[in-house]
Amino acid sequence: MKDNKEKYQIVIVLEPKLEEKSATKVLDKAVKWLETNGAEIVKKEQLGIKELVYPIKKFNKANFWEIEVSFENTVGFREFNLLLDREAKIIRYLILKI
């Protein structure tokens, strides 16, 4: 039987000196939006602070997080992109369909 779920990998890049409590608050906001829109969170993992190849918003390092989700139905990420764009602590993000 074929699995009809669409799977996505979301990589969120946060400011490097952000306290864990603040980082968790930002990520919880993103996870809450995903769950409200029918996502099943498969994995949420901190990848750690890594050196950037080039500066982003004057940062040479960043705190990387990975969230894997699956959706029953096709979802539009326009509102999710707006949510992530408006969050000042997020310096970059990437959404990949896997």
Image (cartoon, rainbow, N blue to C red):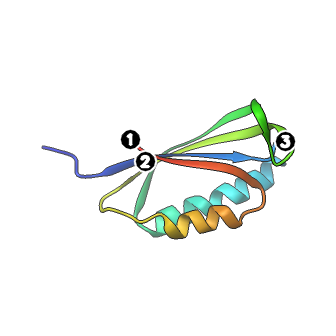
Relative vertical location of residue 3 with respect to residue 37 in this rendering, above or below: above
The residue at the far front in this view is 54
**Label 1 Cα neighbours within 10 Å, binned few <14 / some 14-19 / many ≥20:** few
Q: Please provide percent x and percent y for residue 96.
A: 46, 45
**Can you identify the residue that label 3 sits on?**
59
**Can you identify the residue that label 1 sits on?**
98
* Left or right of residue 7: residue 45: right
The amino acid sitting under disc 3 is Phe
Measure how far apart labels 2 and 3 are at the Cα level: 27 Å
**Can you identify the residue that label 2 sits on?**
8
Q: Quadrant of residue 29?
A: bottom right
Q: Please provide percent x and percent y for residue 40.
A: 42, 55
First in sequence: mark 3 or mark 1? Answer: 3
**Which residue occupies 62% across, 67% down?**
83
- Element under label 2? strand
Measure how far apart labels 1 and 2 are at the Cα level: 5 Å
Of residues 42 and 4, the one nearer the viewer is 4
**Label 3 Cα neighbours within 10 Å, binned few <14 / some 14-19 / many ≥20:** some
